[in-house]
Image (cartoon, grey):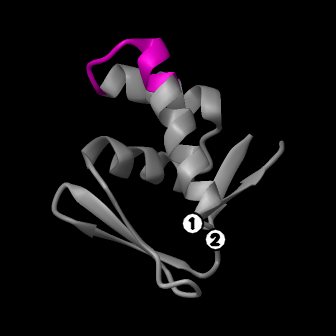
């Protein structure tokens, strides 16, 4: 599975973080450095397993912890209508 930004969402980098705004609901999300990097990879079309692997090499942390955090982040962003998933 991979994801893409919902068409009604804009993303802007502000320093080390990224702010997402859903133009339909006016909901705003701010992503920290790790979340911002995850979003960049999502926008590149990286799937879940590669996303976890790349974040594991770029940031300190246990692979299983990063996998759990990625799943939580993606779930929250999907639920908020910030990203859409697609099966490959």
Count of picture labels? 2
Specify start and end residues of the magenta stretch as a single range: 59-67
Can you say which quadrant of the picture contains the C terminus? top right
| Helix, strand or loop for disc 2 | loop
Taking the magenta stretch, the answer to whether it contains residue 64 is: yes
Q: Percent from the top left, x then y, of residue 63?
A: 45, 14
Can you say which quadrant of the picture contains the N terminus? top right
Q: Is residue 86 left or right of residue 59?
A: right
Image height check: is 5 above or below 3?
below
Q: Could you tell me which residue is drawn at 47 percent across and 84 percent down?
A: 26
Dot label at residue 28 = none
Farthest residue to the left: give it: 15
Q: Could you tell me which residue is drawn at 46 percent across and 31 percent down?
A: 69
Other-residue count near label 1 (Cα within 10 Å), few / some / many at <14 / 14–19 / ≥20: many
**Which of the pair 10/88 is nearer the observer?**
10
Residue occupied by mark 2? 6
Q: Is residue 32 left or right of residue 67?
A: left
Q: Choose the circle earlier in sequence order: 1 or 2.
A: 2
Residue occupied by mark 1? 82
Other-residue count near label 2 (Cα within 10 Å), few / some / many at <14 / 14–19 / ≥20: some
**Label 1–label 2 contact, CB within 8 A:** yes
Taking the magenta stretch, the answer to whether it contains residue 41 is: no
Q: Percent from the top left, x then y, of residue 53?
A: 50, 22
Q: Quadrant of residue 21?
A: bottom left
């Amino acid at each position: 599975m991979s994801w893409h930004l919902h068409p009604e969402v804009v993303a802007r980098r502000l320093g080390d973080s990224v702010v997402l705004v859903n133009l339909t609901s006016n909901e705003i999300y701010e992503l920290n450095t790790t979340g911002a990097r995850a979003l960049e990879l999502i926008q590149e079309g990286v799937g879940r397993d590669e996303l976890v692997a790349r974040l594991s090499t770029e940031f300190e942390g246990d692979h299983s912890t990063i996998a759990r955090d990625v799943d939580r982040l993606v779930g929250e962003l999907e639920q908020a209508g910030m990203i859409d998933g697609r099966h490959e």
